[in-house]
Image: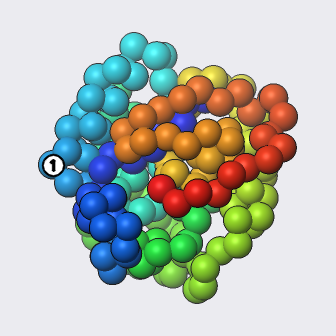
Amino acid sequence: MILLRHGQSEFNLHFTATRRDPGIKDPKLTPMGQYQAEQAAAALAAEGITRIIASPYTRALQTAAPLARLLNLPVLVQPQVRERYAFVCDIGTPRTALAMQWPELNFDHLDEVWWPAMEEPADQVENRARLFRAEMVALEDWDRTVVVSHWGFILSMTGESVANGQWLRCNPTEPAPVQISWRHR
C-alpha cells in the first residue's frame, strides 16, 4: 500500500516556524498543502489505485480529494489511521459537521466525537497501526490502496518520518518496525 502524509496544514506552517502549538483545531490545508495534494494525486494517478482510505481529519480529507476526483474513486473514511492525539490540531470535527462539509463521503460509522479525549500514548498508536496492518493483509488489493494519514500513524506503520505531501510504500505482510523514535514533527 501507499501511505501518503497529508499536505501542509495551517498547524504545520505555524508549528514549524515556532515549535509551539498554535491552538488550531482540525486545521485545513494551506495553499502549499493544496498544491502538495494536487502533486501527489498527479504522481499517484498511474499506480493502479483501487482504494483510497483517509483519516477523518480535514487535512487528510482535503489531501485525498484530488486523487479521488482524478481516479473517480470514493474516499473511505477510517478513524483508525488518524493522527496521534497530542496537540490541539488533533481535536477533530464532529461527525455531523463533517457530513455537512463532505456530503459525498460516508461518516455513518463514526462516533460523533471520534478522536480521543486526552493525549494518546505512543504505544496506543503503534497498536492501532499493528491492527490496521493486519486488516490490510486480509484485503486482496492492499497493494493498490492509498492511505492518507499523518506523521505519527505513518511513523508507527513504517518507523520512518515523512514530510507533508510525501508518500512511501508499505508492505503490511512484512513485520512492523521493532523500535520507533517519537520525535516531534
Q: Which residue is more in the foreground, 22 or 64?
A: 22
- Left/right placement of residue 25 relative to residue 178 reads left
**Residue 132 horizontal/vertical position (percent):** 72, 48
Q: What residue is rendered at 49% in x and 81% in y? A: 112
Check the image and report above or below for 17 versus 89.
above
- For label 1, the residue is 31
Q: Quadrant of residue 178?
A: top right
Q: Which residue is more in the foreground, 43 or 106?
A: 43
Q: Is residue 172 visible?
A: yes
**Residue 184 horizontal/vertical position (percent):** 52, 60
Q: How many marks?
A: 1
Check the image and report above or below for 61 versus 1.
below
**Residue 179 horizontal/vertical position (percent):** 79, 47
Q: Residue furthest bottom?
A: 117
Q: What residue is rendered at 30% in x and 67% in y? A: 18
Q: What residue is rendered at 34% in x and 30% in y? A: 40
